[in-house]
Image (spheres, rainbow, N blue to C red):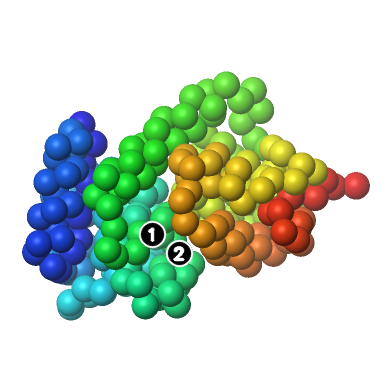
Amino acid sequence: MAKILVVEDEKNIRELIKFNLENAGYEVLTAENGKIALNSLEAEIDLVVLDLMLPEVDGMEVCRQMRANKKLRQIPIIMLTAKGEEIERILGLEMGADDYMTKPFSPRELVARIKAIFRRIKELKVDQEKIKDKIISAGKLKLDIPRHEVFLGTEKIILTPKEFELLRYLVINQGRVLSRDLLLEKIWGYEYAGDTRTVDVHIRRLRQKIKADQIVTVRGVGYKFAKME
């Protein structure tokens, strides 16, 4: 049974999420602020539902600390934001959140997204077992699939789980134009009902980290990883 940590300071929302996740068969821990959340992460947590606006330690800082911690950086994070917090939402994605939902949201949709994340993790493990070449190269880039490690020359690049999945998918499809909707389906594991800025933010972070211009924007469509000449 997967264990989910719900971090939300509003009790009614926290209990609503807990109720729906438990009904879906998950074990649920809760935290009312970021400080408690960071302490709770000492347990074996499989996914975090994280409110952005929290007392004491806010969601952005919780996200930052998780992504900076080698033991915690692989845990998926779904961030909850209010309607008027677009800048904060984008910053949350840039900090390493895998996805976000805007309040008010449907608990059923939250459960569906969580199921999709776990399904995608399972599919990725199966895909990795099928891959004959455990090391994928593209120019100076090298992806160690089993270890989830990326090297640019001799420099190790630290990526979040979603950034790694996205880069891997781009590289194995070099030269192919991939739409944002396709990337959402393949990397996030569901048919996304909202906007596609999640993909754009992750692409921007990848470009900054791998210092490469091989990730090309195809205006009005999506992205492609240019083939090396």
Q: Is residue 122 left or right of residue 106?
A: right
Marks 1 and 2: CB-CB under 8 Å?
A: yes
Q: Earlier in the sequence, mark 1 or mark 2?
A: 2
Query: What is the three-letter code of the residue carrying label 1?
Result: Tyr
Q: Nearer the viewer, residue 199 or 20?
A: 20
Q: Nearer the viewer, residue 68 or 95?
A: 95
Report crowding for label 2: few under 14, some 14 to 19, many 20 or more residues within 10 A (C-alpha): many
Can you tell which mark lies on residue 100?
A: 1
Q: Report if residue 71 is visible in the image.
A: no
Residue topped by disc 2: 93
Report crowding for label 1: few under 14, some 14 to 19, many 20 or more residues within 10 A (C-alpha): many
Task: Look at discs 1 and 2 and give the one toward the viewer.
Answer: 1
Task: Residue at 48% x, 67% y: name it.
Answer: 94
Can you tell which mark lies on residue 158?
A: none
Q: Report if residue 92 is visible in the image.
A: yes
**Compared to 131, does 43 lie above or below?**
below
Q: Is residue 103 left or right of residue 162?
A: left
SS under mark 1: strand
Q: In which quadrant will I find the N terminus? A: top left
Q: Nearer the viewer, residue 190 or 33?
A: 190
**Compared to 209, does 106 lie above or below?**
above
Between the C-alphas of marks 1 and 2, the distance is: 8 Å
Query: What is the three-letter code of the residue carrying label 2?
Result: Leu
Task: Residue at 49% x, 24% y: name it.
Answer: 126
Residue 181 position within the rendered picture, expressed as x and y whole percent measured from the top left: 59, 47
Residue 152 position within the rendered picture, expressed as x and y whole percent measured from the top left: 67, 55
- Residue 82: quarter of image: bottom left
Residue 208 position within the rendered picture, expressed as x and y whole percent measured from the top left: 63, 67
Residue 16 position within the rendered picture, expressed as x and y whole percent measured from the top left: 13, 53
